[in-house]
Image (cartoon, rainbow, N blue to C red):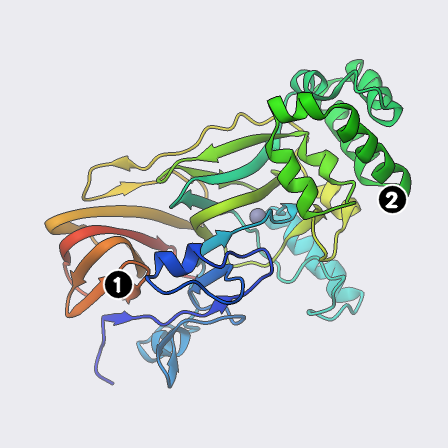
Amino acid sequence: MKSQPIVKLSNALKPYAWGSHTLLSDFEGRPPASHPEAERWMGTHPAAPSRVSPEQTLQEHRRAQGHPTGELPWLLKVLAARQPLSLQAHPNEAQAREGYAREQAQGLALDAPTRSYKDPHAKPELIVALSEFSALCGFLQTDAMIARLSDSGVDAIDGPLRDARTMPEPEALAFLLRTWITGPVEPRRDALIRFVSRNEARLRAQTPWIFAVISSFEGDPTALIALMLHHVTLSPGEGLYLEAGVMHAYLGGLGVELMGPSDNVLRGGLTPKHVDPEELQKVLRFEPSRVQPLTASGSDARAAWRTPGAPFELAQTRVKGKGAWDEGPTDEIVLCTEGSVRLGELTLRRGESAYLAQGSGPREVWGEGCVMRASGSIG
Ligand SMILES: [Zn+2]
């Protein structure tokens, strides 16, 4: 077969209910959608593989080019959230291997709704904002959490906070989370409702985003856990790298997400999907996070977001006229995020993407715009 080093991709869309009717369609230059559009997937994941033609998936194309499995060991997405996503954390490699083996031994079907470990892999993820992007990420220090929540006039909240003051940090965080995430739902729901009504002025002044979380998941007492986390607003170009064991929830906005080849999500709440508070507590790192949005470092030709230890890299090339970057050690997917660029014989407009095989020659682009480039280690 004739080698095709650069091919345009056609990518599947995930219409999850939390998706936006306008963010993704605006980005791709289409009229608003009639249903929510949540994620555009670029890669070889079997749940929504990219295609290089109506007859051939990207994985088949890569196999035909000589790659043994054709799989890419990472997945690139454009994510468009109108509503908050679930509170979640991801396991590390050892936890994923153990959890997957355990659920296999239990005979749980891979698509069973109660299945937590779908594969034996870690799922580090990097989100980079394309619009203003709002997220919850990492535990506050206990002191900051106490300042945010205490003297609320609700015993189910003030009592545990009093107890937590006397504990060392990791223990205090684990204790508060366990108290507010497990046990009968009704008393916890009741405590949340009373907490919000008694403290509305304080919450509106300090944590206004909590009302979006609560109204999206009416009656879900795990909204209280959101108040244990940092709230971050990313400007376009800023990113968050989420390593194993860090609790997070995306609240809203348009972003590019690059992640490990895994579906292992342990959810703590704010979702109609399966939640597994016990398993979540096993993988969480009970330590306060210092959340520092990442910016890409480097030149216009090649700037990258630092994700140490990840099996992938996200980089960016901004071009006015002619641009070029050095070929990396692996194949790449290139996504145009601004303007329009010419790459080989292809033109990529905003929202369009292409696959570049390793060894396909100089990485040169013409035009005016910006491309994000995902690459990684080939498994
Ligand atoms: Zn996640």
Which of the image's four quarters has the C terminus?
bottom left
- Residue at image coords 47%, 54%: 79
Left-right relation of 96 to 314:
right
Q: Earlier in the sequence, mark 1 or mark 2?
A: 2
Disc 2 crowd rating (10 Å Cα; few below 14, some 14-19, many 20+) is some
- Could you tell me the amino acid type at mark 2? Val
> Which numbered mark, 1 or 2, is in the foreground of this view?
2
Q: Position of residue 358 (x, y in %)?
A: 26, 63
Q: Amino acid at mark 1?
A: Gln
Q: Please tell me which residue is depicted at 24% across the width and 36% down the height of the picture.
A: 298
Q: Is residue 44 above or below residue 201?
A: below
Residue at image mark 2: 185
* Left or right side of 277 for 372: left
Q: Residues within 10 Å of mark 1 (few under 14, many from 20)?
A: some
Is any atom of residue 67 visible in this view? Answer: yes
Helix, strand or loop status at disc 1: loop
Which numbered tag is attached to residue 358?
Answer: 1
The residue nearer to you, when weighing 6 against 156, is 156
Q: Tell me where residue 61 sits by quadrant.
A: bottom left
Which quarter of the figure has residue 144? top right
Q: Nearer the viewer, residue 117 or 211?
A: 211
Across and down, in percent, residue 163 comes to 84, 18
